[in-house]
Image (cartoon, rainbow, N blue to C red):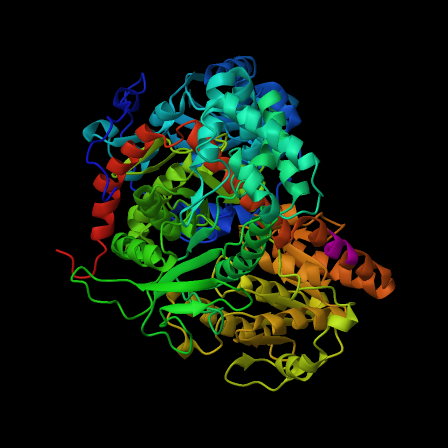
Amino acid sequence: MPGASSRASSTTTSSARSESRPRKADPTPGPSVDPPLLRGARPGGYSLRSVTHGPWARAARQARSQPRPVPFPTRYEPCIAVLGHSTGAQDVLETLSEFLHTHREVVYPLLRHYLSLGRPFLLQSDLWDEFQNFCARHPSPGLCTGTLGKTIRVTQEAAIEAPWIYLAIRPARGQWDYVRLHVDSMEGEPIEVAEFLAFKERLVEGRSTSEAWTLEIDLGPFNREFPKLKEPRSIGRGVEFLNRKLSSQLFQERAQGIERLLEFLRLHQVRGTQLMLNSRVTDIPALRSALRRAEQYLAEQSPETPWEEVAPALQSIGLEPGWGKTVARIADTLTLLMDILEAPEPATLERFLGRIPMIFRLVILSPHGYFGQANVLGLPDTGGQVVYILDQVHALEKEMRRRIADQGLDIEPQIIVVSRLIPEAGNTTCDQRLEHIVGTENARILRVPFRSENGEVVPHWISRFEIWPYLERFAEEVEKEVVAELGGRPDLIIGNYSDGNLVATLLSQRLHVTQCNIAHALEKTKYLYSDLYWRDNDATYHFSCQFTADLIGMNTADFIITSTYQEIAGREDSVGQYESYRTFTLPGLYRVVDGIDMFDPKFNIVSPGADANVYFPYYESDRRLRGLHPEIEQLIFGAPCRESRGRLDDPDKPILFTMARLDHIKNIAGLVEWYGRDAKLRERANLLVIAGHVDAAESTDREELAQIARMHELFEDHRLDVQVRWLGVHLEKSLAGELYRYIADRRGVFVQPALFEAFGLTVIEAMGSGLPTFATMYGGPLEIIEHGISGFHIDPNHGEEATGALVEFLERCEAASGSWDQISQGAIDRVQSRYTWALYAERMMTLSRVYGFWKFVTNLERDETRRYLEMFYGLEYRPLARALEPHAD
């Protein structure tokens, strides 16, 4: 990448595979197909309601006019038992072919039915719905309960052009097979992923793939020798795997492995001060001797004796600061190392690495949006990520201080959050270069401007979809600013979202620093067919740039943090966000045949929490901020004004509360529509909405403007002004926390109706405050909430069912107040046991040390991969980004 050597490794392509043709002559291409709107995608099982025009729209209308098919089963063992944990497409095909030949008379009409739909692509939900409907009309035990049905159940996508049906089959998480069926001959054959993608490209482009050469991105060959997890259940537990691998490696390669450990311990310095070991320890025998002598000496000292008093003696035998602040701590750390030298064991290795003082200066990158501490939430592209990072900084600084002190060092840790400086910042502080982070001792926000090609500062806010041409210049300036501000290189760089992760890649490779990525939400799974029809929406969303940046960032990261398992590998019936980058195509640009591996040990699940000082249970009376209640009551029950719409006529009803950005994915307007349509729910509860702006004149975001118009339309259509209160305000954290508790006092409920939610910080906040929570089943809330115990899952694609569940709960609470208390306490217990920032920070600091050590002892630079990605960056990303530059040539 910029600043790196121009040398690049050769690419690996498989164009011969991609150009292989069906054995029969290709049919004449049919008419071109309108692309779907990129809205409301349901990960893995997209809603037909997302598609509003073209053949998809007709299919959607037909599907809605029919009885709702039987939903997906919750367990998939029968299918996996038949297909196996995929030993290859050939095995799948043999099982399927046998069924096709023995049940030809019932299978043929079904396959003809799929062809007759006239739709080139069918997603999992489409395939299953049509199968269920077909079985209802043509009952046949051989068909409906046989191998074909079980195959369809785990087929994520079909690409169709008569007489061919191409299937992408996912028998288990992270495992894929590709086959194609010839409907007329009822025969099939396994195919390579490249051929499947090429067939899709032809359906979109309306021309044979042999007419043009297509670049294939294949990262698989670079990772063949790299250790990988094997089981889907292990995905996201990379550090556990690495600890076992490292322990085994140290045991099997005793001399070489321990020598590398010795070199690693001698590396560490801070501000010119040597840490851990000095020059007296020259080899392994010298290390063992030093440890024995230190152990003997420490046994004669008081356990509480500080390092300063024993330092001269320990330094004379080769030990430097960093082993511990007291004799007891020093002796314990020495014992851990001696145990590793004797017989390496994963838990011991992790404990020892977790104590090595190696993280003093931390940089966190979050370029887009308005990053500030006040008056920013709810502004365009500004929401949960800002809250996440600020809470993260507080927790990490506390953990860094604790670890540094425990190891006997008097060093001030530094954390810098780097974001964009926006001169036209309104009433925010985003025009200030430096800003101290309140509640920390030495953490600050450093803002660096975006610059145009001629070096001029870009003064106005820029959408996260439009920032790509500025990031390389931004990274170059950030490098200089950060090194000057810190007085040297950082020890760890954390990227956030697609833009921050790309900048983290550029910086980490220039500074040779460990890189951690946090996606928060990958846009690819949010928008239906966002890759396949990228051209039709590139003028607005520029997904070609973003998906390219994502591929580069996730493959260069040393480790990746996710909040949930689903974020990596999805569910049995839906594809994970990262998994969606394994294979995809941007027709006419490039196709990805192996983009990322879910089984890579770089993936780790580290769930964030809510600030326990702000979001605590409603019944902890001594901590409550009751002085805010008059302001809260004015917000909820006050008269309509410029920042609000609606006034609650019956204030005694329980409150359904929701709070989020006002965009399509958050589905706030969807919740309002559900409420407006359900007379029983309107009779039993009021609805309080805090989202976006009420006055369209206050917004400059296209998507928010559309949602504002929709909200006002719903108020008019359903006459909601006496039952719904809509506030376009941005609440300070303490006020938001007390608002949750105030609504809990009134036995209310929190609703999170998003079409997809990567994690769900508001869910954690509401549950931690004691509000029973109903949240989307797509994304993080599925793992956060234990259905019926600590809250409830809702399907945002079926609003009537969601409101029905709310009515049922409210009726149950009216009949027995203990029902509300039970779910409320279950929510509190769940958050306190699993989702706290203290747990997050402890894990994050351990991960950074383990991956730093792993990178050192195994040469985890992955030079070949890095060179390949440098070429991809230079030849694909840079031209795409430059094309977005205003007034670019």
Q: Residue at x 37, y 32 (%)?
A: 861
Compared with 707, 800 (above or below) is: above
Left or right of residue 43, residue 431 in this image = left
Is residue 37 part of the magenta span, yes or no? Answer: no
Quadrant housing the N terminus = top left
Q: Residue at x 56, y 18 (%)?
A: 251
Left or right of residue 540, residue 411 in this image = right
Part of the protein shown in magenta: 825-829
Residue 243, x across and y down, in percent: 56, 29
Left or right of residue 544, residue 324 in this image = right
Residue 658, x across and y down, in percent: 61, 66
Is residue 828 part of the magenta span, yes or no? Answer: yes
Q: Quadrant of residue 532?
A: top left
**Would residue 181 be seen by someone viewing this image from the given angle?**
yes
- 522 and 871: which is toward the camera: 871
Q: Quadrant of residue 553?
A: top left
Q: Residue at x 51, y 24 (%)?
A: 286
